[in-house]
Image: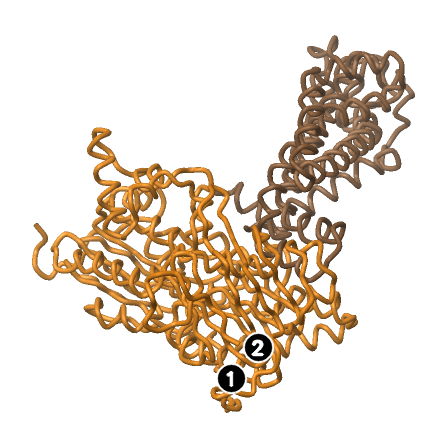
Chain colours: A orange, B brown
């Protein structure tokens, strides 16, 4: 169909700048994706990877402008405006970085996935089922509403929607950031099935070297002058063989039980001990209730049963019933970078706020301390004056972390702390956590990232509602995660 | 395209502020006494009277320049009152428990069943015109504001930043004022524009019907009805108050929208 040598998607000299001050985000990017090819785009957090996808699709957010360059599809120029919109609708599939935010909370999964399909009803239902099955989501799942999905499930649903429509050009922004390895494997297979089909091509933004290695025909590495130079790697004290000298647990749960609103049991009889200075990671398949565990500990969504104890004293199940010093002691960094920061607040102010509320710092002192925290997570000082919409997903994630650290918590709860970060930024964050742990902070991280799990003192697995130590696992739920 | 540029830049808010200031200070800028005859009735526009004269020979320009202050003050006060009540009700509905939310919605629906203009007319019989406009605006506008603000509030309540504010021990009023309101500023600003337009319509309607300011006071709405009979003799006398009346509705409304967008309605 396609003449040999004609690229399906081609961009030349693509330049994007900010409308208000003319600062350049992308400077003359060229790319070319041939029939059946997969292009991987990598680069540091904030290098403009997501912006590049938006520029290709002509869906740049307000405030950004494509000032030069062309996008060609099969050699024909795609004009911005109505032409670009028709082309997007007919030919392109796009999966954004923060899918849970994009889903209509009340729609059922089957409706979301089938949204862009045409044809007879039965055939549409069939294709929806196939797309869900391909990503390991069963039929019962199709009836759920979007707000009942976990982060990784939402990501798969959005992906299933894009795949079901079978677009010529598929653009994926961090498609596996919230997934465990088994689920990510299914995504890899689904994308691999598109490889080599001459009508199809795929563009993939990712930090995951596995994805790049297994899928990419070519790799485009974005670097941007705006990217802050990373601080030299700090050699934090080794945290490893610390378990023997374990002090008493700072945060512990006994018989914690979490039930989803529809009655499904996510967590049963969970006993968990978080020891000062230790990193505990919780692994588990997507949708197994890892986020719910963190929410129960922080009092965001109260547990149905069981107890959470802080230094031996029972904590109220709901955050607004807890005392201020109890709240300060336990800080949670949520999973969706887009929803964690108030769009109306400047970054510096957001990070300074906990210092003022919880530690009584004045305006100047808190601003200085906030700037230090931003530097510690690898962000430049000039970001402090911006509002969140100017930041990339990875930058927002680190701002949310800095804000939680500003409370100087005893226990830090992290939900996928590195999902939107490139390897170098992730290392800065993990090194920082190592240093803070050396000072006695306990960290509980829910993650799929082996780089995080490698540094852990304790690895737990959440499977079928039971929290069990990692390793060869007894299929019967006879052991619970009591570890101290 | 032009409209979008206007909306984004500082031009519209600046123009709106200038316009409001001019209208409020208008009486000082008038070349003649707006309540005294200075020429032959229905004189056409001339060098001395750029917009001609009205039925009693008063200078139309002077009357237009000084005829908006009361109308604008009443409308601004009425819309501000409606907005305040509406936002407060909306926060109560969106933040409070489900039963509180239902109760607020029920009261709002009841109030919305009464047409605003009829309400204003009935009130104007008992109250002075300006008070009637304010009360009618609150009773008919606040439920609408409460509806949108309540719905948005219920959404934002579960967002990560609101939850983390609670988890660092912010008190409820602080969470509402510091987290929720700024996050909803774009929506509230857009709604403020709507409230102003409806308040203006109510104030104008009452004035045209003779329930507002009484002659010989200069007032745009009153001028519309006064100058209608002379439309063929001096059309400028009829058009002159209509143009600023339309501007009053359009400018502050789009300024509010633009300001809301700049305040971080980008989400």
Instruction: Name the residue carrying label 1.
Output: A243
Instruction: Name the residue carrying label 2.
Output: A275
At numbered mark 2, what does the secondary structure look like: helix, strand or loop?
A: loop
Instruction: Tell me where residue A204 sits by quadrant.
Output: bottom left
x%, y% of residue B241? 74, 24
- Dot 2: within a 10 Å radius of its alpha carbon, few (fewer than 14), some, or many (20 or more) residues? many
- Tell me the tag on residue A48: none
B220 sits to left or right of A469 = right
Q: Nearer the viewer, residue B163 or A172?
A: B163
Instruction: Give the residue drawn at x 22%, y 56%.
Output: A190
Instruction: Tell me where residue A165 sits by quadrant.
Output: top left
Instruction: Give the residue drawn at x 34%, y 43%.
Output: A141
Same subunit, labels 1 and 2: the answer reads yes
Chain of the residue under label 1 = A
B197 sits to left or right of A198 = right
Given the current orientation, which residue lies at the most extreme front position? A478
Tell me, yes or no, if residue B46 can be seen here: no
Dots 1, 2 in contact, CB < 8 A: yes
Q: Nearer the viewer, residue B72 or B169?
A: B169
């Amino acid at each position: 169909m396609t003449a040999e040598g004609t690229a399906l998607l081609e961009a030349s000299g693509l330049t994007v700048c900010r409308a208000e001050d003319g600062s350049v985000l992308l400077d003359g990017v060229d790319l070319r994706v041939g029939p059946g090819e997969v292009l991987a785009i990598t680069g540091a957090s904030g290098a403009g990877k997501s912006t590049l996808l938006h520029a290709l699709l002509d869906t740049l957010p307000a405030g950004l402008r494509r000032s030069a360059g062309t996008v060609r599809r099969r050699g024909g120029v795609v004009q911005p405006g109505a032409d670009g919109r028709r082309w997007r609708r007919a030919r392109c599939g796009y999966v954004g970085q923060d899918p849970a935010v994009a889903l209509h909370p009340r729609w059922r999964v089957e409706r979301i996935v089938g949204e862009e399909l045409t044809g007879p009803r039965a055939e549409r239902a069939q294709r929806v089922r196939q797309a869900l099955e391909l990503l390991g989501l069963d039929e019962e799942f199709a009836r759920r509403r979007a707000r009942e999905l976990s982060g990784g499930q939402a990501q798969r649903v959005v992906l299933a929607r894009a795949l079901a429509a079978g677009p010529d050009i598929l653009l994926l922004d961090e498609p596996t950031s919230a997934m465990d390895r088994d689920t990510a494997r299914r995504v890899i297979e689904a994308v691999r099935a598109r490889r080599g089909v001459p009508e199809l091509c795929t563009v993939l933004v990712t930090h995951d070297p596995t994805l790049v290695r297994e899928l990419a025909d070519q790799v485009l590495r974005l670097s941007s002058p705006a990217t802050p130079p990373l601080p030299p790697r700090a050699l934090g004290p080794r945290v490893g063989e610390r378990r023997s000298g374990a002090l008493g647990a700072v945060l512990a749960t006994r018989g914690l039980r979490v039930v989803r609103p529809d009655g499904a049991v996510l967590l049963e009889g969970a006993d968990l001990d978080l020891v000062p200075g230790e990193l505990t990671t919780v692994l588990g398949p997507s949708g197994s209730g890892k986020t719910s565990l963190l929410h129960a500990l922080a009092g965001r969504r109260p547990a149905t049963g069981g107890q959470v104890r802080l230094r031996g004293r029972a904590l109220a199940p709901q955050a607004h019933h807890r005392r201020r010093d109890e709240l300060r002691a336990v800080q949670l960094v949520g999973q969706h970078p887009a929803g964690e920061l108030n769009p109306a607040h400047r970054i510096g102010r957001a990070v300074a706020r906990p210092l003022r509320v919880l530690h009584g710092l004045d305006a100047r002192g808190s601003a200085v301390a906030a700037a230090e925290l931003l530097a510690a997570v690898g962000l430049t000082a000039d970001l402090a004056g911006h509002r969140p919409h100017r930041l990339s997903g990875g930058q927002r994630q680190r701002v949310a972390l800095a804000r939680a650290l500003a409370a100087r918590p005893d226990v830090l709860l992290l939900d996928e702390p590195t999902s939107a970060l490139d390897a170098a930024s992730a290392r800065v964050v993990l090194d920082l956590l190592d240093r803070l742990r050396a000072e006695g902070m306990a960290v509980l991280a829910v993650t799929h990232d082996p780089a995080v799990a490698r540094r852990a003192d304790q690895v737990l697995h959440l499977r079928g509602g039971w929290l069990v130590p990692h390793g060869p696992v007894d299929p019967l739920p006879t052991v619970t995660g009591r570890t101290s | 395209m032009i409209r979008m540029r206007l909306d984004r830049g500082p031009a519209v808010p600046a123009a709106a502020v200038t316009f409001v200031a001019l209208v409020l200070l208008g009486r000082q800028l008038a070349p003649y006494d707006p309540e005294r005859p200075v020429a032959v009735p229905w004189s056409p526009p001339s060098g001395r009277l750029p917009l001609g004269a009205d039925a009693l020979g008063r200078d139309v320009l002077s009357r237009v320049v000084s005829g908006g202050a009361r109308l604008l003050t009443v409308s601004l006060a009425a819309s501000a009152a409606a907005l305040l009540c509406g936002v407060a009700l909306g926060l109560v509905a969106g933040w409070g428990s489900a039963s509180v939310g239902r109760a607020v919605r029920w009261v709002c629906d009841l109030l919305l069943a009464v047409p605003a203009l009829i309400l204003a007319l009935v009130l104007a019989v008992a109250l002075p015109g300006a008070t009637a406009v304010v009360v009618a605006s609150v009773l008919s506008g606040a439920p609408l504001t409460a509806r949108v603000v309540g719905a948005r509030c219920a959404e934002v309540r579960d967002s990560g930043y609101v939850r983390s504010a609670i988890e660092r021990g912010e008190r409820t009023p602080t969470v509402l004022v510091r987290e929720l309101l700024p996050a909803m500023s774009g929506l509230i600003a857009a709604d403020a524009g709507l409230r102003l337009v409806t308040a203006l319509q109510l104030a104008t309607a009452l004035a045209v019907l003779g329930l507002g300011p009484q002659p010989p006071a200069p007032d745009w709405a009153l001028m519309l009805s006064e100058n209608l009979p002379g439309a063929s003799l001096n059309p400028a006398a009829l058009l002159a108050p209509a143009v600023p009346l339309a501007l009053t509705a359009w400018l502050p409304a789009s300024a509010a929208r633009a300001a809301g967008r700049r305040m971080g309605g980008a989400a």
